[in-house]
Structures are given as C-alpha cells and as structure tokens.
Amino acid sequence: MGPLLRLTIFLSRLVRNPPSRRKATVMLVALLLAIGLVVVEKMGAWPESWKVDRAPIMRMH
C-alpha cells in the first residue's frame, strides 16, 4: 500500500470518526513539532554536534 493511499484512508477515517479535542490537540502539536524540526534542519540551524554523517551506500556489482 502506497503512502498516499495510506494517508487518504487515515484522513477518511478521521473525518468519519473525529477524535476528542485532547487527542486532536496532541496530534496537532506533534505535527507542528515535526514541521518545526524539518524547517530548522533545512535552514542549517542544527549545532554541529547534532549533525549525522551519512554513511556511503555500498553497491554490489
């Protein structure tokens, strides 16, 4: 199952059976936190000690 189909199913369930206000608030805070982390990473504002060096991908011939 693709990620877009999975998201569509999740959103349709959310619309048909809305969560409680508390659960919706927790979901919104988690979403905002994730978006904030992506923005900070894309801006290059991470401290140098927090950056992860990517390992090279070993390809088999």
Image (cartoon, rainbow, N blue to C red):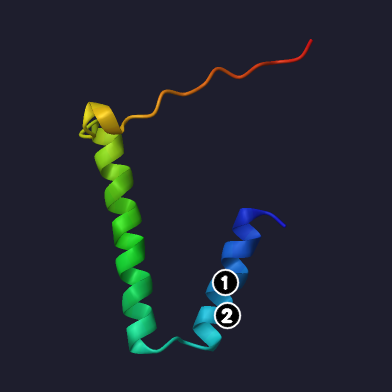
The x and y percentages for residue 19 are: 44, 86
- Residue at the spot 55% in from the left edge and 17% down from the top edge: 56
- Report the amino acid beneath label 2: Arg
- Label 2–label 1 contact, CB within 8 A: yes
Secondary element at image label 1: helix
Outermost residue to the right? 61
Give the residue at mark 1: 10
- Which quadrant of the rendered structure holds the N terminus? bottom right
Secondary structure under badge 2?
A: helix
* Front in this rendered view, residue 6 or 37: 37
Q: Residue at x 33, y 85 (%)?
A: 22
Q: Residues within 10 Å of mark 2 (few under 14, many from 20)?
A: few
Q: Nearer the viewer, residue 1 or 44?
A: 44
Q: Quadrant of the C terminus?
A: top right
Q: Is residue 18 above or below residue 33?
A: below
Q: Which residue is mark 2?
A: 13
Residue that extends furthest to the top in the rendered view of this protein: 61
Q: Residue at x 52, y 21 (%)?
A: 55
Side of 48 where 8 appears, left or right: right
User: In the displayed structure, would residue 23 be above or below residue 11?
Assistant: below
Q: Looking at the rendering, which quadrant does residue 26 occupy?
A: bottom left
* Distance (Cα) linking label 2 and label 1: 5 Å
- 16 lies above or below 29: below
Residue type marked 1: Phe
- Looking at the picture, how far across and down is residue 51, in whole percent? 32, 30
